[in-house]
Image: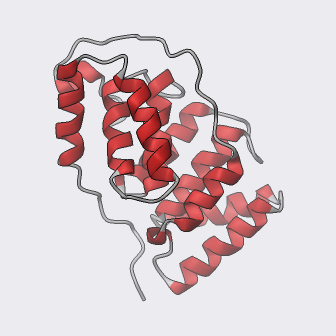
Amino acid sequence: MLNLSASEQFNLPEQKPQIETMRRPTYKTLLVIACLWPGLVLSTSAGADFNDAVVAYDHGKFDPARGAFTELAQRGHAGAEFMLGAMYFYGKGVQRNDAIAAVWFHKAAIKGNASGQLAFGSLHIRGLGVRQNLVKAYGWLTVAANHGIPGLQQQAIALRDEAARLMRPVEIADAQQWASGFTATKAGLTLN
């Protein structure tokens, strides 16, 4: 899915608009969003491991946090996938790499993780780690906003509206249609 261009996915010509500024949200903002999203904790054991990893991350103990997030991500934990994306996006305990961050954000996003959807959509606005694609940005940001999570919803709408100012009406319609048909894939972890 990451390799599809706007023209391949939506049958539209590629467009390279420029957006003047886009700030990176702080890692604490992303951490709060990740912790507020109820779908992150899928089992008691995984939830405890995830919470312990979040605490380690919050205290700057990035190596143990990365290890725990990696183990959980290998089992399909969307919250851990999102946190690995955040670590690579900000260079916390790893070398900063937008492309690797995009992969982890995408893995979380397709599983229905609102934070992952917000992050993945945001990357498409300026082409950080992915090819710039405002249609994909608008679509993912719409899906993220549809979760209705306070704070995250407002961020997603603001970014989506920023992208929309540079889009043609047909592109917006295509992105809205894609977003309305989005269905999350199942996570690898199950309830106990």
User: Is residue 151 shown left or right of residue 121?
Assistant: right
- Residue at (34% x, 33% y) in the render: 138
Q: Is residue 43 above or below residue 105?
A: below
Q: Position of residue 43 (x, y in %)?
A: 48, 82
- Residue at (47% x, 46% y) in the render: 154
Applied colour scheme: secondary structure
Extreme residue in the bottom direction = 192
Q: Is residue 191 above or below residue 79?
A: below
Q: Quadrant of the N terminus?
A: top left
Q: Position of residue 165 (x, y in %)?
A: 37, 20
- Asked whether 39 or 8 is in front, the reply is 39
Q: Is residue 61 above or below residue 131?
A: below
Q: Quadrant of residue 63?
A: bottom right
Q: Position of residue 84 (x, y in %)?
A: 61, 52
Q: Quadrant of the C terminus?
A: bottom left
Q: Quadrant of residue 183?
A: bottom left
Q: Is residue 155 above or below residue 138?
A: below
Q: Position of residue 17 (x, y in %)?
A: 41, 11
User: Is residue 178 shown left or right of residue 59?
Assistant: left
User: Is residue 168 shown left or right of residue 134?
Assistant: left
Disc count in the image?
A: 0
- Residue at (56% x, 78% y) in the render: 47
- Asked whether 85 or 73 is in front, the reply is 85
